[in-house]
Image (spheres, rainbow, N blue to C red):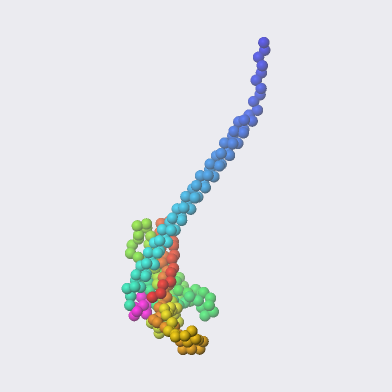
Amino acid sequence: MKASTPPCQQGAVLLTALVMLVALMLGAASLMRLVESSNQLAGNLAFKRAATLAADNGVEAAIDWLERQSAATLASDAAASGYYASATGAVDASGNAATSVTAAIDWKNDGCNGVARSACLTTMALPGVDSAGHSVRYLIQRLCSAGGTPAANGECALYLESEADSSSRGAIAYGSEKRLTGQPWAFYRITARAVGPRDTVSLVQVLVRW
């Protein structure tokens, strides 16, 4: 009896298996890349949050400095402590920002690195670095156009706590001499900057009244 001849192998199964294997490899590579990107994004967010918290410490240090100063001290600049009694030079006469009138801020303690501005504002550094490796500096600016006491300076952003007492609703009217009374409180702008690992930089700015 004559043996039957086996059918010819076309290799279709092998080709299909190779195509599926390549597809699985590409999918695995894409998944690994996605996981790596997610981990990197989560790490960057963590570094940014840590830098923001460190900058908040700079704001707290600035507020603590303000609490310990007298009115006479706050009436004039204390550049060595990162404090300025005025916040001028923001815009030119037309209300437009210009490098010739805008002050630079010395965040790197390098004299503003030769930047051509109207002034180089000194910042105050917190001692050393924190446990996470952040270095923090802050700047305090009183929102006045010039030095002096807020009551004497007519161009300050001021806050008045109370208004004149009145025995009737009509006592305070247009054109009357009734005005807001009380001790004026000046506003101070505190800007803190933290630099941490991977050159992470965070800026925090707050307004306080004092």
Q: Residue at x 41, y 57 (%)?
A: 197
Percent across and percent down for residue 64 are 34, 70
Residue farthest top in this picture: 1
Considering the image in quadrants, where does the N terminus appear? top right
Q: Residue at x 43, y 69 (%)?
A: 206
Q: Residue at x 44, y 68 (%)?
A: 205
Considering the image in quadrants, where does the C terminus appear? bottom left
The vertical placement of 45 against 105, above or below, is above
Percent across and percent down for residue 209 are 41, 74
Decide if residue 38 is on the left or right side of residue 13.
left
Q: Quadrant of residue 156?
A: bottom left
Whether residue 121 is visible, yes or no, is no
Q: Residue at x 49, y 50 (%)?
A: 38
Q: Quadrant of residue 123?
A: bottom left
Q: Which residues are magenta?
A: 71-80
Principal SS element in the magenta part?
helix
Decide if residue 6 is on the left or right side of residue 74.
right
Decide if residue 94 is on the left or right side of residue 10.
left
Q: Is 79 within the magenta?
A: yes
Q: Quadrant of residue 16?
A: top right
Q: How many marks?
A: 0
Residue farthest front in this picture: 168
Q: Is 76 within the magenta?
A: yes
Whether residue 94 is visible, yes or no, is yes
Q: Nearer the viewer, residue 200 or 171?
A: 171
Percent across and percent down for residue 152 are 40, 85
Percent across and percent down for residue 13 are 62, 30
